[in-house]
Amino acid sequence: MELHHEFTVPVPVDDAWHALLDIERVAPCLPGAVVEDYDGRTVTGSVKVRVGPVTVAYRGTAVFEEQDEAAHRMVLAANGRETRGQGTARATVTATLAGHDGGTAVSVHTDLTVTGRPAQFGRGVLAEVGDRLVGRFADCLATRLTTGPEPATEDDEEEEPRPLDLLSTAGAPLARRAGLVAAALAALAYTAARLLRGRRTCRTRRRR
């Protein structure tokens, strides 16, 4: 699926460009993400995603295939696999930066492929989640660029990032859809049970 997002940050384009390439600096703005290693081109890390009561952990790499500073354009190819399952996630992210009213406008195009449990929600819900995540990321990045990160403490270093919660991130629309799906499954299960009981009754009568 293809997703497109735009956001702005209140700093000049050159500052925003270097900030987005500072992976350790922006990682805290990505819910559930942990950066294990970064050599300037390849990022190794993990992301945890919560789907209701189930938490899915992905581990993989992301490689900067393009970093065109003159055009302020970057392309990132990411691949991840569930640590305890067969699900996978692949994404090619293209970001373009341009000056806008003293700040920077960022355009992000994502080509995303997801298999496994998170894929059950479909493009519409994942697009809603993406919209909210980009909004949170933009707010977090703007705060870090204008005020700087908060000093790290020992507790912060020991505490693991919370998983990205798909249900709470998508909000009411996803909750309603999940409710409809649950109702449909309940109705299906009820109908199947009635049919099964009916067949058993018929068999019992025939035997008599």
Image (tube, rainbow, N blue to C red):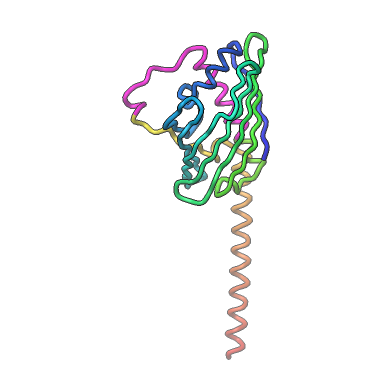
Residue at the extreme top of the image, as rendered? 102
Which secondary structure dominates the residues rendered in magenta? helix
Which residue reaches farthest bottom? 208
Compared to residue 158, the image places residue 114 above or below, namely below
Q: Position of residue 48 (x, y in %)?
A: 47, 39
Comparing 56 with 37, the one in front is 37
The question of residue 82 being in magenta is answered with no
Q: Quadrant of the C terminus?
A: bottom right
Residue 65, x across and y down, in percent = 58, 30
User: Who is closer to the viewer here, 10 or 65?
Assistant: 65
Question: Residue 64's x, y, as percent?
Answer: 56, 29
Q: In the depicted view, which residue is nearer to us: 142 or 81?
A: 81
- Which region shows up in magenta? 130-157
Question: In the rendered image of this protein, does residue 147 appear above or below residue 161?
Answer: above
Q: Residue at x 59, y 63 (%)?
A: 189
Above or below 42: residue 58? below
Where is residue 76 shown, x and y percent of the image?
A: 58, 30
Residue at (54% x, 39% y) in the render: 79
Give the residue displayed 68% in from the left and 37% down from the top: 2
> If the image is split into quadrants, where does the N terminus sit?
top right
Q: How many marks?
A: 0
Image-based side of 60 in relation to 4, left or right: left
Question: Does the magenta run of residues contain 146?
Answer: yes
